[in-house]
Each structure stands twice: as structure tokens, then as C-alpha cells.
Image (spheres, grey):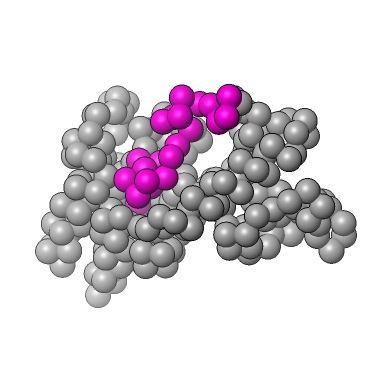
Amino acid sequence: MQRKKIVVLTGAGVSAESGLSTFRDAGGLWEGHDVHDVASPQGFAKDPDLVLRFYNQRRRQLEQVEPNEAHYAIASLENKYDVVVVTQNVDNLHERAGSTNIIHLHGELTQAKSVLPPYNVYDIGYKDIELGDVCEKGGQLRPNIVWFGETVPLMTEAAIVSGTADIFIVVGTSLVVYPAASLLDYVNGNARKYIIDPNKPNVYGIHKNIEFITEKATKGMVHLADNLLKEI
């Protein structure tokens, strides 16, 4: 029998419970700098050293934290379902928890890419990127992160996958960050939809079959995963 398809859209609220800080938690500032200073092409052009230091610090922090119950609950769904995780997070906690099919909409913190075409990507783990670290063609390496003002290259793939879902789960995101928030629009009207958020988000009335779970990511995801696994 063909397995049902679950697509899980995750955001910063999932990783926050592992201790990863977010822009919003920090009031949009880092060492007194606006997020656009450290997360935009313009910011990188103006002060690349500042941007690299910011992401080096985030990479070091990531090495020190562990996946939480929400990450493991999502991974457990693969025991009985065909699961795709579409994440806005740039960390690798889904992978470390055991999820095997992940679309990183906003890039990956443990990767670097060249500023020169063809923009080759390199796995760097938790190593720092320094000024002077270059690709084979001499291009400076930068974090493989989708910055403010840049296109989201995997958005089309994520939209197509969302349209195939029998069950669509939103956890750890308030559905206000676009274009990721628009993925709900691509989900089949007959698909079951679950939104896990302690503060019930305002979702447009055109969406049907939505069940709201007003809990934090860990508690809500564990509860939902347990119920879904019992169905099969």
C-alpha cells in the first residue's frame, strides 16, 4: 500500500527550543547592527568581515546544541509515512534528528558558496569562513544562506511538494514570512492541515480542514506525531 504523504513546514520556533537564538528574539539586532547589515547582499558588500563573523558565531552555537523533541517527532513520522520537511531554518537539527528528506528554503549554515559563477557550494561543517577563503576560481566564500532581497531558489520545488501532501503540518512559524508562508496556498483543499502555534495565527478563510494546536513546537509536535502514527 502506498504511504500517505506528509509535508512539514518548520520555522525558527522549532530550533528556538534547542536554544538557538533568532533575529526576532534579539529584537532584530546583533551587536548593535540591524539584521540587514549582517544578512543582505548590501551588508556583505559593505562589511564582509562583519557578516562572516556573524555567521561564524551562529555556526559555533549550532555545534553546541542538540535536536529537541519536535525534531525527533517529525523524524519519527518516516516510520509510517512519506515525509518531506520544508524548513525555513538554516541549521542541521532536522538531519541530526534523523529526517532524510529536507528542503532548506533559506540555505544551510554548514555550507559555504562562492561569490563567482557557477556559485559552487562547499560543505564546511562548523568551520569559520574568513576573508581570503576562496574557491578554485579565486572567489571569496560566503555563507550559503538566502539573504534578504535574494530569491529563494528552492521555492518552486517546495510549492510542488506541498501540492502533493495528504497531510500538511506547520510548526514553529507564524506564517508571516514570505514567500514560505504562501506554501499553504499550494496545499490541496482536501488535505488535512495542522498548525502548531501557541498563538493561533490569522490564516485566510479560504483554507479548509485546518486544525489548530495551540502549543509550543515540542509539546504540540510530539502529541500530533503520536496520533498520526497510531492511525496507520
Determine whether, in the image, residue 122 is placed left or right of residue 213.
right
Q: Tell me what residue is drawn at x 20 percent, y 54 percent.
A: 222
* Picture quarter with the N terminus: bottom left
Residue 126 x %, y %: 57, 59
Camera-side residue of 1 and 184: 184
Asked whether residue 29 is in view, the answer is yes
- Residue in the picture at 61% in, 41% down: 54
Please say if 37 is above or below 49: above
Q: Which residues are magenta?
A: 4-32
Which quadrant of the structure image shows residue 122?
Answer: bottom right
Residue 131 vertical placement versus 228 (above, below): above
Q: Residue at x 44, y 56 (%)?
A: 64
Residue at position x 64%, y 51% from top? 144
- Please identify the quadrant where the C terminus is shown: bottom left
Residue 170 in view, yes or no:
no
Q: Is residue 63 magenta?
A: no
Image coords of residue 178 (percent x, y): 49, 32
The x and y percentages for residue 23 are: 48, 33
Which of these two is toward me, 170 or 11? 11
Q: Residue furthest bottom?
A: 1
Q: Is residue 5 magenta?
A: yes
Q: Is residue 4 left or right of residue 118?
A: left
The answer to whether residue 189 is left or right of residue 96 is left
Percent across and percent down for residue 152 are 59, 43
